[in-house]
Structures are given as structure tokens and as C-alpha cells.
Image (tube, rainbow, N blue to C red):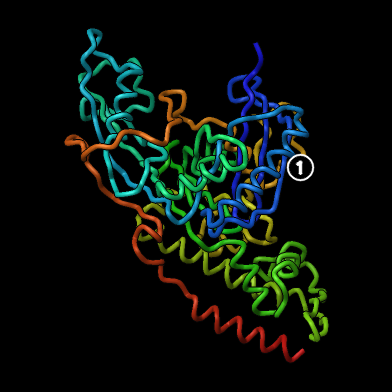
Amino acid sequence: MKNEIITGLDIGSTKVCAVIAEKTGKNKFKILGVGKAPSTGLVRGEVSNIIDTAKSIKAALNEAEEQAGVKVTEVIAGVSGENISSIRSRNYVTITNEEQEVTMADLRKLKEDMRSIQFSKDMKILHILHEEFFVDRQGVVTNPLGVACSRIEASNHVVMASGTAIQNIQKSVKRGGYEVKDLKLQSLASASAVLEDAEKDLGVLLLDIGGGTTDVLIYQGNAIRYSRVYGIAGNRITNDIKETLNVIAEDAEQLKTNYGYATEAAIVKDDTITVKGVGPRPSTRIPISLLTQIIRSRVEELFEIINIELEKSDVKKKIRAGLVITGGGALLKGITDLAEKVFGVPARVGLPAEEHFDGSIGELSKPEYATALGLLLPLEEDYLVDDSEVEKPKGTFWSRAKSSDKIKSDKSEGKKPKSKSSPIKDFLLKIRDQYNDL
């Protein structure tokens, strides 16, 4: 019997990454092939051009297939974007079997009943993640299978995505010649790849900083307590460099990648670097510290926005183990120092753990591959109930479900979070004036 072949597809705003792996055991995989392609069809994590996105998907998957020596037909794709929202909701089922104990059928019914609820028009349930189980309205259990009781109740973290956004991902993948087997929230995938069990138990904040979005997740007590997506990420930093130093986007990205620091304190030696001229404008040289001021202002703004929202939502107190930064944005030198300053908790860069893979994962051990590798791994609760389907029958609000503590994305609230965009713009204009005087 051949081992199962699984393909993770990270469709990002700057790159598409495909990883083909062979399942060799429980939560154990052997990497067969990896493919990457530039992404031009997404804006802030959402598909804006299906044709361009399909081309990027096909290019990445073809490269991975050639390396792996296998042809795949379906993928597990990551989902992000400001359309993502989440809500906390509780529901219960009455135990009716002769043994009066919780069975797999009871746990499936909990999820099926929750999926029958139409929380919001055009929003599709992506994940139903159990926070806690309560037996007979009092005792709390982490795994209720086999527990004797008359009623089992679940506190759920329900993650939803725009139906339109999901369709555009599915259409892009199909146009590229493949089918979507499953969809997973990107931050959940990244968490599976980089977070330690002890961190998820004690309480940890994950910041997955990509090109178009920053995905935020809080684990505590081995359960998801908070999730949100922000449309401020690496591309915004690149644009700041472009507009401030009057360079083309490709050169701005190269400056960020090669010389990017998130804080001046992290600079080892303040050398001067060349900024290419455009047209008749000559090339000039600037100190790295000037570039760092541009980068730091935007990263600091992002961290402050997130920190304020966490304090408003009363979940920051759950972050007792600290925070983990992953994604391409984690490559900015000194970013953990800036994060510790803003959030007031210890920080580290999240690298994909090799424990789930046979042998060394080599180049894939970088933070920008966290999502693609994490998509291969099952969610913690997959062993309890199959959570692979996105489309489920719609229904009216189930009378036994209670919704509370709504946590929405910026878009679902109908307005963007208040930011310090004007002060940053003024600050960057000052830097540009200094640069023009050089």
C-alpha cells in the first residue's frame, strides 16, 4: 500500500509556494518537492486577478512536481485576507446512547449543528475549533470521548471567510489545473509548523507577517482564543521605501531584503548603501540607519495597532509565554527587539520544526515557509472530528446556540482600525526631504 501524497499550497501576495510530501507516519512527512513562483494576482491576501493567480499556482506546482517526480491533482490551500472573521459560540448535544457516554458521533453532531448556523450573509465557516468541553454544565474536559454524562457542551472558536473569496481561490486553483482538497486558515497552518506545545498551553501570540497580510493568533490552554487578519505587512513597508527614496518597487524590495532592520539598535555597523537612480535621477548613497527609520516606523505602527486591539479584546493577559514572529517579515533583523518593546513580552522568530519531517528540511527551515509546511500538518482536533469540508448546508440560527464576544476582521466591521497613518506620512516626508538634500 502506497503512502498518501499531500500537497500544501501557500498562495501569498508576493509568492506562491507549493510543497509536495509523502505521509510516512502519524504527523510525519517526507518532503518530495518544493516549488515557488512570484505572485501578482493577490492584494492583501485576496485574489484580485484569477488568471495571474492561476499562472503562479501552476508554475509553483509544476516545479514541485518535477522535483518530486509525481503528478498531483489536489492541494490543501491556505486562506487569509481581511475578509476573515471569527466568533465565539457555544452549543450542546444530549447524550442518548445506552452507555450514557460521549462518542465520536456526539462530537460530530456538535460540529454539524454549529455548521448549520448562518452567522452572516456570504460568510462560510472555515473552521470550528473547540476551546473547551463542558460535561453536565460543570466539569471541563479537554478530550470528552468516553466520558460519562447526560449532556456535552462545547465552547467554540468559529473562523469564517467570505464565500466570494473562497470561490476565487478555488477558481484560481482549478484554472491552474488542480482541485482544492481542503482550505485552512494560514495562521493556523503556520502555528502548526512553528509553535511549541508548551507555548500553546501557557499562552502565546503568533504574528505571521507576509507580503500582503499580518495574521494574528493566540493560543492558550492548547486552544485558539483569538484570530484576526490585518492588511498591513511587508508590501506596505516596501511601498514606504519606494515612495520615500524615489525608487522602483523591485529596488525597494531589494533594499529591504538585503539591508532591512526593524530598529536602529540592531544595526551592527551603519554603512552607507547605494540607492539606484531612476531616469535622469542619479544613484546616491545613504546610511543604513536612514533606511531603518523608514522600516521601523511602519513595523512599529503595525505592532501598536495589534497591541491596542489585543488590550481592547481583553486577551493580551493570555500571552504568558510570549510572542512568536514568522513569515517573511520575521527576516527583518531586530524585529523581535521591537516587538518586545511594544508588546512588553519576550519574543522569538518562529522557524518550522523538523520533528514532523524525515531528515533535514534544509532551505525550508526559514520562516517564510512556515505556512506551506504547516498546511501538510493536521489541526489538533482533526483526530476528533473530520473538519475538512468548507461547504455545509445552511440553516437558521440553531435555538441551542449562543453567540458572544464577536471578533471581526477590519473589513467585517465596516471600517479600518484607527492607525497613525498621518504621523507616519509626515515622518516619511521628512526623511525624503533629508534624502533629497544628500
Above or below residue 214? Residue 178 is above
Query: Vertically, is 213 above or below 106?
Result: below
Instruction: Provide residue 266's location: percent of width, then percent of height.
Output: 70, 65
Where residue 402 appears, as percent x and y from the top left, is 22, 41
Q: Residue at x 69, y 88 (%)?
A: 434
In the image, residue 220 lies at what x, y percent? 43, 41
Residue drawn at point x = 60 percent, y = 44 percent: 10
How many numbered markers are drawn? 1
Left or right of 377, for residue 285? right
Residue at image location 17% in from the left, 36% down from the top: 399
Q: Amino acid at mark 1?
A: Glu
Q: Pick the residue in front: 388 or 424.
A: 388
Residue that badge 1 annotates: 363
Q: Is residue 432 left or right of residue 91?
A: right
Residue 247 against residue 11 in the figure, above or below: below
Residue 200, position as x, y percentages in the image: 49, 39
